[in-house]
Amino acid sequence: MVAGWALLGLLVIAITGGLDDRFGLSPRLRLLAELVAGVALGMHFWDVLGWGGMGLAVVLVLLMSNAINLIDGMNGLAAGNALISAVGIAILLWSIPAGAGLAVILAASLLGFLFWNYPRAKTFMGDSGSLSIGYLLAMLLLMAAAQGGATFLAALAMVGFPLYDTAAGIIRRWRRGRPIFDGDRDHTYDRLDQLYLRNPAKTVAVVWLVSGVLVLAGLVMGKVGVGMGLVLGVLLAAVLFWGAYRLGSL
């Protein structure tokens, strides 16, 4: 694996986010940059994963960078979720120094950021931060994929909340006849805050708890094999989407 490709992809995604923060890029231009970053990350894993890894890298960079960006709607929400996911993946990949090391560095960086972002924000990550975090999580997922299907499913569960919230948002807007990339205030965490908690800091803490449960589930999935892992993954998804339905987020 050539580290230069991974660093190139991270540079592309970080600069894209910074330009979007400063000037506001068109969705097409941002998508193009994310595709370039995904290809660069795929090149990093070429010797291990080949063409399949290239396709998976592009998909994961697109999914994770946008998913983290979309849940950056309350102080500490995106950073806290990514921190919990990174800790879980560090445990999952503990026998892989590069994977565990990257996950620990990401978690430590996010912990430092959280002190300034939660519960009252003195600084914000912006698109540059959220896209970069999503890219690094995509890289960790690819490291998990290189260890086998069960490990990949486990890591995927650990980043499950932002992926689930993004999927729920796409379904919600499609059902309501709205463009799927339009923003709204009907995310799961928004509805939880509006209907029950009425306190953003408490709402974020509850979502962190959900992410913690997903990390624990991921650790179990990593031990039971691909077949049972898929069953557990489907059950987790069913519970999450039932919750979204009850909250009016679908």
Image: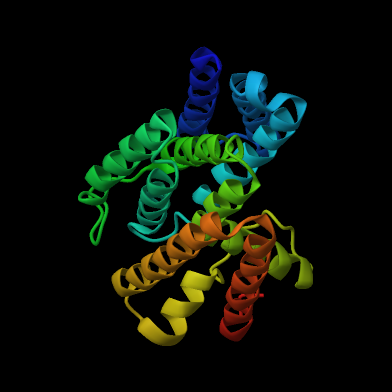
Q: Residue at x 46, y 79 (%)?
A: 192
Query: Left of 55 or right of it: where is 82?
Result: left
- In percent of width and height, residue 85 lies at 42, 52
Please tell me whether residue 32 is drawn above or below residue 87 in the rendered image: above
Q: Residue at x 50, y 33 (%)?
A: 17
Quarter of image, res 33: top right
Q: How many marks?
A: 0
In this rendered view, identify the residue nearer to me: 245 or 124. 245
In this rendered view, identify the residue nearer to me: 4 or 124. 4
Quarter of image, res 165: bottom right
- In percent of width and height, residue 97 lies at 38, 30
- In percent of width and height, residue 249 lies at 61, 75
Please tell me whether residue 192 is drawn above or below residue 89 in the rendered image: below
Please tell me whether residue 96 is drawn above or below residue 111 in the rendered image: above
- In percent of width and height, residue 2 lies at 54, 14
Q: Residue at x 52, y 57 (%)?
A: 223
Please tell me whether residue 153 is drawn above or below residue 128 in the rendered image: below
Q: Residue at x 67, y 75 (%)?
A: 250
Q: Residue furthest front?
A: 224
